[in-house]
Image (tube, rainbow, N blue to C red):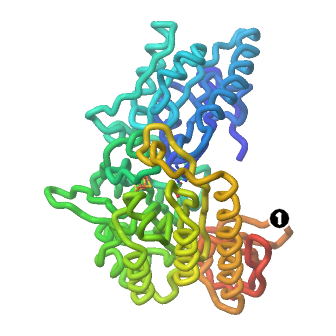
Amino acid sequence: MSQPALSPNTRGLHIITWGCQMNVYDSARMADVLQPLGYRPVETAEEADMIILNTCHIRERAAEKVFSELGRLRLICEARKAEGHNTLLAVAGCVAQAEGEEILARAPYVDLILGPQTYHRLPEMVARVARAGKTVIETDFPVETKFDFLPEDAAPQTNGNLTAFLTIQEGCDKFCSFCVVPYTRGAEISRPVSSVMAEASRLVQSGVKEITLLGQNVNAYHGLEDDKIVGLAGLAERLRTIPGLERVRYTTSHPRDMDQSLIDAHKNNPILMPFIHLPVQSGSDRILKAMNRGHTAEEYRDIIRKLRQARPDIALSSDFIVGHPGESDKDFEETLQLVRDVTFASAYSFKYSPRPGTPAAGQPFQVDEDVKDKRLAILQALLREQQDAFNASLVGTVQDILVTNTGRKKGQLNGRSPYLQPVHFEGDISIIGQVVKVRITDQLTNSLSGVLL
Ligand code: 5AD
Ligand code: SF4
């Protein structure tokens, strides 16, 4: 969407976002906290007075990618300077958290370095850079939470979208062997119910129909309401009372926190979409143990059985890692077997990459790269087959489609199914924003087409 031209009192803000949906959410909140200083989003770095690179540390070569992008951005800042503009350059997110000192040493031209838990301090940091004239770094885990400092009256940055993210939980205490999140995002915290409800209401007032609740362990949510603790099922029940909110999703869940109340909620609360991202990582008990996941493959299968009992049309997606240290051919075969048993509507799969400072990085029996490559190809072929089969299984069915925008062809509308598939069909633009019944007639490469009923 194109941005309006800047008025003389406003400054251009360009945020580059890498990584997960939570980073997308964080970038929007950084724009919110900078709004009172006059910063407004601009589309290119070349027209910005401040550039923020919001980084991701989850997989390999994260830091190198950041340094190479910073080199490119530095040139843009220098060109702006030659034209008489002073452009601030900031590095935010998980690489800033994990490698702040390294960035300071290798890229001293960066003005601000801030971790994911300190972006509410951005306005103060901007003032400090102006005073100090050298890099300001904020990568501690402050006692106050950023959620307490988000401007409540900031117009939600939804860009007229009908769907939005909302972070309700952040951080992780689970310490899976391979994962940097507990070190970069810090300890697990949940936002109070009232704060989530207020933000959800604001989003709905601005036209949002579908909210995806975000958290690294979103189903471990335990927000306070008065003196009581409310879980994710309870929160979804409260969200159901917001008039105009049609759909709620949540991601990412952990199998250990998939409790009976949440399983029951999928039966009783129609606002919850029947599509859950529930990473299992591996189908081998030996590897699940080495990963410190805290559950077995059978316990995962059992959760899926219960979910399908509660809501027969539920579909699953997952994350997988191949080649975790110690993974044998037999372990990998057990992962394939789990995939065959469960069947997934979609999935993400990755080669294990050692992350500095995590327990698995130092373990013996690292798996060869070519073995990882082969396993990944086999797993992805199977997952692709299942995804195609799932999409094909919807042809002939009637689905509830949230109509999101006009399509590329004249008279065509786009929408999304309960399973997040893009769906195209013919209809009048007046139904954009509604949930309508569409009979699915065809499966295309990455979408479905149908007829409006
Ligand atoms: N190597 C490969 N994949 C990883 N993930 C997290 N850490 C690593 C790693 N070190 C994957 C997991 C997680 C997803 C977000 O990224 O599958 O669920
Ligand atoms: Fe990482 Fe495991 Fe925590 Fe998920 S549960 S964020 S994979 S440590």
Outermost residue toward the left? 227
How many marks the image carries: the answer is: 1
Give coordinates of residue 260: x percent, y percent.
29, 78
Residue in the image at 42% along x and 74% along y: 297
Give coordinates of residue 265: x percent, y percent.
35, 78
Q: Is residue 450 above or below residue 350?
A: below
Residue in the image at 71% along x and 85% along y: 392
Q: Is residue 294 above or below residue 224?
A: below
Give coordinates of residue 385: x percent, y percent.
70, 78
Outermost residue toward the right? 410
Going by the numbered disc 1, the residue's amino acid type is: Arg
43 or 301, nearer to the observer? 301
331 or 403, nearer to the observer? 331
Residue in the image at 48% along x and 25% along y: 100
- Residue 430 visible in the current orientation: no
Residue 134 horizontal side relative to residue 414, left or right: left
Residue in the image at 44% along x and 74% along y: 272
Q: Quadrant of the C terminus?
A: bottom right
Dot 1: what SS? loop
Q: Quadrant of residue 311?
A: bottom left
451 or 51, nearer to the observer? 51
- Residue 19 visible in the current orientation: yes
Q: Quadrant of residue 220?
A: bottom left
Residue density around tag 1, few if under 14, some if 14–19, many if 20 or more, within 10 Å: few
Q: Is residue 125 above or below residue 429?
A: above
Give coordinates of residue 366: x percent, y percent.
54, 50
329 or 250, nearer to the observer? 329
Outermost residue toward the front? 365
Query: What residue did someone put label 1 on?
Result: 408
